[in-house]
Image: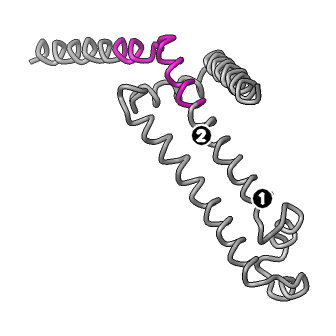
């Protein structure tokens, strides 16, 4: 009986050691995984930037609200009926402002949905890889710095390409 207990204890030790070794192997992150993670983050930021530009254009070029100054005035008074009366907001301005608010609300949903879709797609990143890299970034500042650097490089490349396209369109 004593032998059986010792054997069982040794088996548990071996199994525990194998599980720990497997965990350590799983935690090793490749440059490809980091690059995929950075690419997803950059894609999400690019999408957000594009949508944010649309929002700014929507505010600046709104024929009813007539620019950012009036938008800010409405925004400051929005939930206060007395202030809205003071600034003499029209029904058309209310409708235009509500349309902008609706776009803003949909923007965060669109960004979230895009990011979730990219993460869930195993061909692009995959949930397991996302979680692994995200965890490693929290635990290891060097990995965080490496990913941040990769994202910055991707953003810079995207910015240069965007400027080149704008110059080609203008020329």
Q: Quadrant of the N terminus?
A: top left
Q: Residues within 10 Å of mark 2 (few under 14, many from 20)?
A: some
**Between marks 2 and 1, how big is the CA–CA gap?**
21 Å
Q: Measured from the top left, where is residue 33 in percent x and y?
A: 47, 18
Question: Does the segment drawn in magenta span residue 32?
Answer: yes
Question: Does the segment drawn in magenta span residue 115?
Answer: no
Residue occupying the point 59% across, 24% down: 137
The magenta segment is 20-42
- The secondary structure type at the circle numbered 1 is loop
Q: Which of the pair 135/44 is nearer the observer?
A: 44
Q: Quadrant of the C terminus?
A: top right
The label on residue 146 is none
Labelled pair 2, 1 in contact (Cβ < 8 Å): no
Residue marked by disc 1? 61
- The secondary structure type at the circle numbered 2 is helix
Q: Is residue 4 above or below residue 68?
A: above
Q: Measured from the top left, where is residue 78 in percent x and y?
A: 78, 76
Q: Earlier in the sequence, mark 2 or mark 1?
A: 2
Residue marked by disc 2? 47
Q: Measured from the top left, where is residue 79 in percent x and y?
A: 76, 79
């Amino acid at each position: 009986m004593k032998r059986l207990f010792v054997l069982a204890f040794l088996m548990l030790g071996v199994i525990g050691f194998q599980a720990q070794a497997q965990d350590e192997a799983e935690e090793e992150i490749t440059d490809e995984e980091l690059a995929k993670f950075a690419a997803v983050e950059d894609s999400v930021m690019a999408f957000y930037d594009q949508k944010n530009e649309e929002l700014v254009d929507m505010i600046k070029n709104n024929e009813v609200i007539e620019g950012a100054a009036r938008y800010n005035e409405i925004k400051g008074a929005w939930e206060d009926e007395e202030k809205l009366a003071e600034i003499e907001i029209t029904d058309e301005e209310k409708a235009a402002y509500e349309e902008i608010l609706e776009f803003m609300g949909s923007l965060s949903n669109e960004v979230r949905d895009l990011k979730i879709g990219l993460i869930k797609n195993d061909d692009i990143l995959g949930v397991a890889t996302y979680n692994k890299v995200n965890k490693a970034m929290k635990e290891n500042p060097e990995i965080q710095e490496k990913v941040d650097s990769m994202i910055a490089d991707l953003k810079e490349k995207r910015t240069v390409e965007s400027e080149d396209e704008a110059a080609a369109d203008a020329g």
